Each structure stands twice: as C-alpha cells, then as structure tokens.
Amino acid sequence: MGEGRVCFSREAKLEFLKQKRLQRMQTGTFNNETAYVTNLMSRSSGDALRDPASCGVRSFRNPDIFSKSGSGLNERDTMSKQKIDKFDTTDLVWTDSMPECPVYFPSKEEFEDPLAFLQKIAPEASKYGICKIVSPLSASVPAGMVLMKEKAGFRFTTRVQPLRLAEWNTDDKVTFFLSGRNYTFRDFEKMANKVFTRRYYSAGCLPTTYLEKEFWQEIASGKTESVEYACDVDGSAFSSSPSDQLGNSKWNLKKVARLSRSILRLLETTIPGVTEPMLYIGMLFSMFAWHVEDHYLYSINYHHCGAAKTWYGVPGHAAVDFEKIVREKVYTHDILSNEGEDGAFDVLLGKTTLFPPNILSQHGVPVYKAVQKPGEYVITFPRAYHAGFSHGFNCGEAVNFAIGDWFQLGSIASRRYALLNRTPLLPHEELLCKEAMLISSSSSISHEDLASQLSVKASFVNLIRFQHRARWCLTKSRDCMGISQHSHGTILCSVCKRDCYVAYINCSCYLHPVCLRHEFKPLELACGTNFTLSVRDEVLETEKVSRMLEEDKDIVNEAELQFQNASDKVFLSNLYRITEGDSYIPYCKIDFVPQPPIERESLHADNTKSACHYSDSNDSDSEIYRFKRRSSLKPKHRPMNFASSKSEHQGLKRLKKAEPERLSVISIKYKKTGHEQSVSVGKRRDEKRVLESCPKRIKVRGPSISITGLETKQIH
C-alpha cells in the first residue's frame, strides 16, 4: 500500500519541473525528459508508485487549487474533456442498481482479534472482493487532534488528479502530478471544504447516490479539471493515548502486520504501506484508480473522519475476466507491452486507470459497491481489483496483511512479476518455508486456523516437490559442475528477478544466480557455462517435513488442487521432463556424479572488469545490479547505488523508502546451526563472500528461528 521516496531531493525536482514548465509555456510542447522526471515524482491515485512507462502526460489546471500556489501550467495546455465513446455516461441508472458488498457488525468479543475474525468471514466475504466492517469501538481522540497535536509538524504534499476519462491509447493516457503544495491537516481541510461549499452552496453532507452520479458526470463532461489528493502519506492517525479504546485495540493498523496470525510478522524490515500504514487525505472527487494490491495481498482500510468514500470491488475469482475486459474494452492494443492476460496487468500496475464499473457488469464481470463512513473498515481480499472516490474532505488509513490462504495467490503474483521482470516486494518462497516449518512443529491449532494452515502446508508441499524434482533432473543431466550448500537468505534471479530461497543455479563468477525455472544453457554468460547448483543446507529437513505432511490425505488433496492451477506444473512438464525410463521417486536421495573440473581464470576480489555482467532483457535495469566486489572477507552491508529507470517496479521504490542505505534488502532473521560448506567440485572459496555482497539478495529478517531436525522454535 505504500511507495518509496524518490532518490533526488524534492526541491531539486521541483526546480527542474519549474524550468521545464517555463520552456513548455514558450514552446507549447512536452519533451521526453520532462515526462520522465515528472513520472519519477508521481505517485498513484490509490496506493503505490506507478510504473512511469505505463502513463502518458497531459497538463491540467484547476483555478481553485492553483490560484494561490502559482503552480498552474499554461492555460493553453489545459486538458479538454472530450466525449469518450467507449464509456457511456449519459445513463447513470446503473448507480442505483449495483449490488452492495456484505457489511459485518462484530461484537466487542468478536472484535478482539482482527485476523481471527477475518478468517471467520473470509469464505463468504471473499466472494465479493470487498466487505465492510463497522467497528464497535470508537476513537476517543479525533484524527485531526492526533495529526495536529500528537504529531507536531505533520505536513504532506498532495498529488493533482485530472478529472476526466481517457481513450487509453498512445496519445491519450492519464497521469497524476506532484502539486508542489505543502499542507498541514487543518489547511488542507479548509481548502477542501471551500471547494465543496463553492460548488454545492452547503457545508453539509449530500446523499451518497447523488454524489455518485455527480462524480461520473464530472469525470465525463464536468467543468472541474483537477482535484488534489494526499495519497501514500507516511504516518498514522490512530492515537497513542492510553485512554483511546480503538488505538489500544489490535485493529490499530500500526499493529496488524505483527499479529500472531500475520504472515508479515516474519518481516522485521518495515515496508511503508505494506507493514506500516499510510494515510490518504482526500477532497471532493479525489479518487483511487482500478488496482490490485501488491503481491495480491489483503488490505485493511479505516475511515478516520470526514465525508464518505464510495468503493467498487471485483472478487478475486473474476480478476482474469476483469483484465480481459480492460484489455479489450478499455485499452487499445498499441499501449499493451505484453500479449495475453499480462498485457493489461502491466498497464494496470500504473494505478491511474479509471472507468465506470458498469462496463464490467455489462460483460458479466461481478462488481460490488461499498459506501464507507467514519468508524468503518473496508477489507479487500487477495487479487480483488478495486477503485473509488471521496465525497468530500476525509482522512483514511490503510495497510496490507496476509494470512495463510494468501500463499497460493501470492505464488501467482510472483510468477506474473517474473514474467514482467519486476522486482518483488516480498520473499514469497522464504516466507512460505518459514511459516510451514513453524506451524508443522506446533502442537496447538485453533478451529479458525484449520483452513489457513491447510493452505500453507499444501503450498509448501508443492514448492518442495517442485524443488526436489528440478534438482533431481539437473543433477541427472550432469550439466552442473558441482553442488554447494548455502545458509544465506533469499537471493533474486538475475534473469527474471524471482526470489530464490531453497535452491538456485550459480554462474562461474557467482554474481548472476538463476532460479530453477529457466533453461540455463542458452544464457551465454560472459563468464562461461560452468554452472553449479546451490542448495540450502537444511533442505533435507524441509523435505522430511514435507514428506511427513503428505501423510495427511487432506493436505495431499489440497496440494493436488493447487497444483492443477499452478505455474510450476507447466515448468515441470516442459523444462524438467521425465521419461518412462527414468527412475525418479519423490523425496529420493539425489546423488551427484561430478564432472571433471574445468580450469578457470581466478577473479581478483577487487577486479570488477574480470567479472561478467549479465544484462537481461530490461536494459534500463542493468545499472541496478552492477557493483564492486569487496576485498574484505568480513561481510558488510554497504550502500547500493540504484539508477532510476522507467521500468522500475514500485516494490523497489518502497524498499528504497524503507531502507535508503540498503535499498534492495528485506530480511527474516534466521539463526543457523551450521555454516556454508562445499559438498562437491566446482565451488570457490569466495562464493559466500560474493553472495553476501550481491545486490540481488533479499535478506529476510524477523523472528529468528532455529531448526534442528523437525524441532522448530522461536527465539525471542
């Protein structure tokens, strides 16, 4: 739900844009450089930094917003609200007939544990994509008091959103700009209320159905050209006062990521908007465009104060149909960078796509509505697309979370990120292994956890099955020069950026690891083709646990059900084929027959020229992973120099925001009982040192665990 701070200072960027705007006023045109820098500065309308490459640039100006700031663009460049034939907004009857999502009114007892309650209602509520929960507790300290008094000096900068529909072709897209205006909470409220009063001659609330029609009419042909929205603002409006009931409850969004049932509790490094909440401060008609949460996570959104919000949600089971309709009815073919279902997904990641939801219902895609008021939570379920807008000045807060049933959809998200060569935000494979090992060693299980833990165990079994079969095929082919063990955390594949935890393939210089989902021979790395297989040192223990779990028929059945819809099925059948004459047995001992070692020129620890550099299909990302090998044998964390690129995913931006000095690192503290050692030929002494310095690692920290055999305990 968050975004990363941009590498350059805000003042420098604003000055750059100012100069470019002056040039544009003289020439009447945009140039690519201006669009690029503006894109680097932009955040999405909803939750995260969008992909700059997916959004075009149009100028706009709202006299109410810019009259005092002096930040308005040339009047000649104001965007016109032309009629978009693909969206019929003349008939808004659909706003009255759209079905609403379920609403829950938990008692104080049911409200005690958020994730237990959400697990209880998930089988029903997830069918709608979104649901609303009315809190039985009230905040005794208003959000305005928290942000003005408890958080001294709290200020934020808004984004400017154009109020219009787009053709969504090469020449007509939508983007959101940094306004350059900095507000206190109270100042923004005054501005927003002034705009509302000027339009409706009233400071009070208007009927939600009336404002919904007003919004879509304004988007289609209204006179207001833009609004401001403070999205992805660091902070929380939950009070820290000991007398505030809601702030002291587990429904305080600052606490959700660390709850006992939360998968994200394993992450110690904070990710703004994902593990830490962010604020969303809106005005009349400020919007959040159609999007799905990063890694298909859950989201929980609390409405602190102000006017209502209208939400539209599409259930996760209809996500593929949603993307199909967007690809065919909203986007034109020329803006799709990828064929098939991933083409629309790639553009939607920009989070600036808005269109009336009746387009979906007209083509059989279910859409549900929610009107969120102060004191109410809105939950979005994994892979549920959602969008919406504000009815006036308001303040909301949101954060992501995950429970056990998320892993299956998280695996699909990881595959899609890999296909699009996007940096992952979470180490999915490592989180799955850690969670599975923890719950398999636990003797107690509550009724609410049964379905969740079944999903975790089945996902884990499928992962270990795939890893074992892939390693067996690799060693049988004798293409690898050796096998080594490692004990470090997650490392990113140099080809697709997929996270690797259990095993990966190493190149000759150990700088370009490749996941087991690639045919590595055709890679043609500059350092040669002497590949080794690196496997976690406790892999036998994880396989032992997986084999034990397969004694439960329910787990096996769930694993088979997941496998039928999993991408690993395709990889196994195509990349690692097993013929009738092969003697593969699940969980069998894998014997390695070493090839004769090939002499290789040694690489000096400080000689960067002798080490190969793999340049993947995304040339603009190549600078991200170029680094200098250290001469010291002692592992150290050094700042990594990331070059900004147009295709950089919002996950990398968030990591920069979370750890500006260690930009690519997210980690789960893991106490090891052993150390890395060589088990075959072809391993260099400096492999561990090189791997520890590799910028493509995702180190995972969190609750440290020690695994000995099947005994797993949490170390405090």
Image: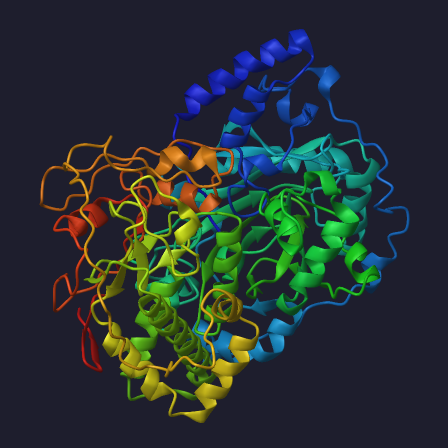
Q: Pinpoint residue 674: horizontal percent, then vertical percent.
A: 12, 67
Q: In this view of the protein, can residue 248 be seen by the observer? A: no
Residue 667 position by quadrant: bottom left
Q: In this view of the protein, can residue 687 be seen by the observer? A: yes
Decide: is 194 above or below 2. Answer: above
**Extreme residue in the right direction:** 91
Q: Pinpoint residue 246: horizontal percent, then vertical percent.
A: 43, 64
Q: Pinpoint residue 237: horizontal percent, then vertical percent.
A: 44, 51
Decide: is 252 above or below 648. Answer: below
Which residue is depicted at the point 27% across and 54% down? 699
**For this rendering, which residue is in front, 182 or 101?**
101
Q: How is the image coloured?
A: rainbow
**For this rendering, which residue is in front, 315 or 148?**
315
**For this rendering, which residue is in front, 417 or 310?**
417
**Extreme residue in the left direction:** 633
Residue 654 position by quadrant: top left
Decide: is 3 above or below 531. Answer: above
**Extreme residue in the top direction:** 26
Which residue is depicted at the point 31% across and 68% down? 475
Q: Pinpoint residue 316: horizontal percent, then vertical percent.
A: 62, 66
Q: Quadrant of the C terminus?
A: bottom left
Tally of numbered tags? 0
Decide: is 419 above or below 138. Answer: above
Which residue is depicted at the point 29% across and 41% down? 527
Asked whether, in this view, residue 648 is left or right of residue 606, the answer is: right
